[in-house]
Amino acid sequence: MYLSARHINIKLKQDSTNFSNDEDYKAIIVCDGIGEFSQSQIVSEKITEVMIEKAYTDISQLIQDSEIIALKDNTENGGTTVIFAVIEKNKKIKIQHLGNGGCIKLNGDFNQSSQGLVPYKYNHLINPHINDSGALTRHLSKESGKQERIVSEITISLNNSNGDILLFFTDGINSLEENVIIKDNEGRFWRHESSSIQIILEKLHVFLMENNNSSDFQDKLIYFNEGVLNDLNDLNLLEDDASLGIIITEDVLKLYRK
């Protein structure tokens, strides 16, 4: 299994990411600091550091951590959204989140699964914690109480015969509340899709075609992760800091080798 998480800070420098692909601990975390708080960078960086370095498997452990409690007490303001994923036994993955951003799941044959003119088929796994006014309803911050720290969680199995791919991202790339639904004059409903997500998938397909047999695929995945964020920025598709996490199972590479 291959993992990576990277971020690009182009505005407030408040996004932060971290990951571990050790034999005994495989996890990804992406955080998006809350822009209205000036010390959110400190919070997001500390949370990604503590979560991975202490090999936590649940956000509840993070909330109870002495360093995080001290951080809340010692900062005037600051807060962040959190998306966390950890690989459990039997190829299960637990995904938790507070706030918005997103996670999509694809099968390894995502480029062959045609629907209309666009070949990519995927599922959104995260329902953002956003109210009708667009404000965050859950987050980790100095202002968050018990209600704001209620974690949403989903566990899925990575068992598709063609392999599984998961992408995690902060709202600088996309969040489901941004994918508005419109109704045309004929009464049909259409959902707007993120240009950034489509470009990531285009580039991911090419990357897998070219590198599926590489002995250093893990290292190349990290470089790809960094490169695609830079590409999105060069295309002026990023107006905010952005984070991207990637999980790819071995069966995806086996499929691409065919």
Image (cartoon, helix red, strand yellow):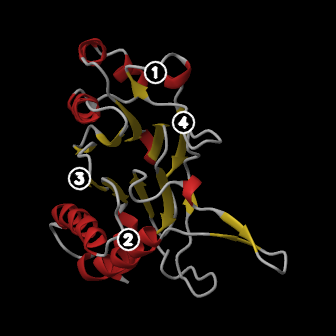
Q: Is mark 1 on a helix, strand or loop?
A: loop
Gap in Å between the C-alphas at discs 1 and 3?
24 Å
Instruction: Indicate whether 78 appears above or below 176.
Output: above
Q: Earlier in the sequence, mark 2 or mark 4?
A: 4
**What amino acid does circle 3 point to?**
Asn
Q: Earlier in the sequence, mark 1 or mark 4?
A: 1
Give the number of the mark in front: 2 or 4: 2
Outermost residue on the bottom side: it is 117
Q: Is mark 4 on a helix, strand or loop?
A: strand
Residue at mark 3: 9
Q: Earlier in the sequence, mark 1 or mark 2?
A: 1
Instruction: Indicate whether 200 appears above or below 84.
Output: below
Local crowd size for mark 4, using a 10 Å CA cut-off: few (<14), some (14–19), many (≥20): some
Where is residue 233? Give x, y as percent.
27, 68
Residue at mark 1: 144
Residue at mark 4: 153
Residue at image position (45%, 44%) is 93
**What amino acid does circle 4 point to?**
Glu
Contact between labelled residues 4 and 3, with CB atoms less than 8 Å apart: no
Outermost residue on the right side: it is 187
Give the number of the mark in front: 1 or 4: 1
As drawn, the label of residue 200 is 2
As drawn, the label of residue 253 is none
